[in-house]
Image: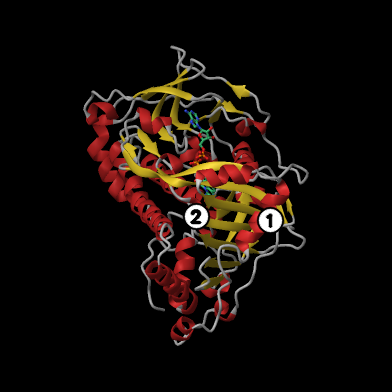
Amino acid sequence: MYRVIGGKVNADVSQLRGLRRFFCNVTAPEVSASNSYMHSNGNKVENQSANGIQQYDIAIVGGGMVGMALACSLASSALTKKLSVAIIDDNPALTSGGWISKEEPPDPRVSTITPASISFLKNIGAWKYVEKQRHAYFDKMQVWDYTGLGYTRYNARDANKEVLGCVVENKVLQRSLSLCIQEKDFQKTVLPSRLASMALQSSMSSTEMDSQLAKLELADGSNVVAKLVVGADGGRSRVRELAGFSSSGRKYPQNAIICTVEHSLPNYCAWQRFLPAGPIALLPVGENFSNIVWTMSPKETSECKAMSEDDFVKAVNHALDNGFGPHPQSNSSIDKIFSSFKSDSVSLNESFEVPPKAVKLASERMVFPLSLVHTDTYAKSRVVLIGDAAHTVHPLAGQGVNLGFGDASVLSKVISDGTAVGIDIGQLSLLRKYEAERKPANFMMATILDGVQKAYSFDLGPFNAVRAAAFHGAQYISPLKKNIILYASGEQRLPFFSWN
Ligand SMILES: Cc1cc2nc3c(=O)[nH]c(=O)nc-3n(C[C@H](O)[C@H](O)[C@H](O)COP(=O)(O)OP(=O)(O)OC[C@H]3O[C@@H](n4cnc5c(N)ncnc54)[C@H](O)[C@@H]3O)c2cc1C
């Protein structure tokens, strides 16, 4: 039903054979196949070289959702499962194992997983674990704003799909990826420490660099060498900093407050309303629960966190109903203009609905600062960045981890292609193939999200009219609606619209 993320990286083996011939004089020293790995019983089997330094083909720094997805993906391919992989992270979630029981309190940190990411997680064998734990598919979405000038409803059937996405708690995703890795016959070692420093010997020429291994020093004093270091260590990436990747971006003047709320009835729709200070989203997380992601000024998030639970629930209901402005009206004059477009969208005749009321707070409230970061390059000799380490985006469309899964999918395929022809997997020319595939796609998404964020930084009549026109266009012009769904689903690489 779904297309695989990164399916565009073709196994152009003949091209890679050419590369191999070209680079045959700079292959890295062989890293002996490590027999050091975490057994499914949780015991670590040590393997150190004669000088006491642990050697791996790949050192993944950061075992968050993206780093773990890369490890799973590498373990899923016949060529890359033979590589020795270290996952460096002292997050206890990596080694805690087991399932999330229904009784465990909900994690207010959730991710909206796109159909393309679901397909990727199915292919690497992780989705079956998600499906046995808490998750909620949704097939409808409503987006509107506080001016009351317009709204858009999306239905998966507008794009001939069954679902628009699935909301999963981050701890469910993390645990599912851990369970998936445990079941694989794969040479992996979890090193429960943090990266402290890294030697890439930048004074060398790139050809000399290609013939060396990267050396990592961990916070527990141990050392690791690897042919390839993958920085999957999140928005404040130490790998990015130590390897000297330059980046651009800015801190948004906004924080997000997140939590889980309970309703009296089940919710199956994703709702998002743009308010003067930022969007509020109500995302179904299963049964009578929904997750709130509410963006506002840092001062307002502090006030929202400090208020009583009852007052906070009232504030949420106010923000999702007619607080800050009226409900959108159909049959306005602008509606009449747009409704002259012929449309076969299933959702065209769905009228505006008020989201279900929250009756109770069901988790703690957490606050996160928001920023936009994009590194100028993703690859250097022996080092590559994936996930938030390479790009951090505004959460308003729930795309962050999905972009990271796209990176993991493509990088794993590029490593597999390199392994197929026996070239050094830390070689810059190979890693650039990953960068060439992912950077334009991530940059495009980051730019669009930043544009939407900026469009809501103004409250002026002309801007309000333009935003209203955008809502109406998306509601009434079915090819536009279909393309928005496919792009947000990760199933269309670029938001260029075809009229069919
Ligand atoms: C409020 C909010 C809502 C969001 N909602 C969504 C959503 O609905 N959908 C979506 O797709 N995305 C969403 N995101 C974005 C998403 O959470 C991130 O894109 C995702 O967590 C990135 O995953 P990652 O594995 O790259 O990094 P992280 O999740 O940050 O993981 C990094 C890992 O690296 C480890 N680490 C850090 N430093 C070191 C070091 N020196 N040595 C070793 N290990 C280290 C950390 O312990 C951690 O385990 C949201 C973000 C926010 C803030």
Q: Amino acid at mark 1?
A: Lys
Res 444 → quadrant:
bottom left
Q: Residue furthest top?
A: 51
Is any atom of residue 491 visible in this view?
no
Q: Which mark is residue 314?
A: 1
Q: Compared with residue 277, is residue 32 higher up or lower down, i.e. above or below?
A: above
Q: Amino acid at mark 2?
A: Ala
**Residue behind mark 2:** 277
Residue 53, given in percent of the width and then of the height, sits at: 45, 16
Look at the numbered disc 1 and give the secondary structure of its residue. Answer: helix
Q: Compared with residue 73, is residue 163 higher up or lower down, i.e. above or below?
A: below
Q: Compared with residue 480, is residue 282 higher up or lower down, i.e. above or below?
A: above
Look at the numbered disc 2 and give the secondary structure of its residue. Answer: loop
Quadrant housing the N terminus: bottom right
In front: 333, or 121?
A: 333
How many labels were placed on the picture? 2
Tell me what residue is drawn at x 46 percent, y 45 percent.
408
In front: 283, or 205?
A: 283
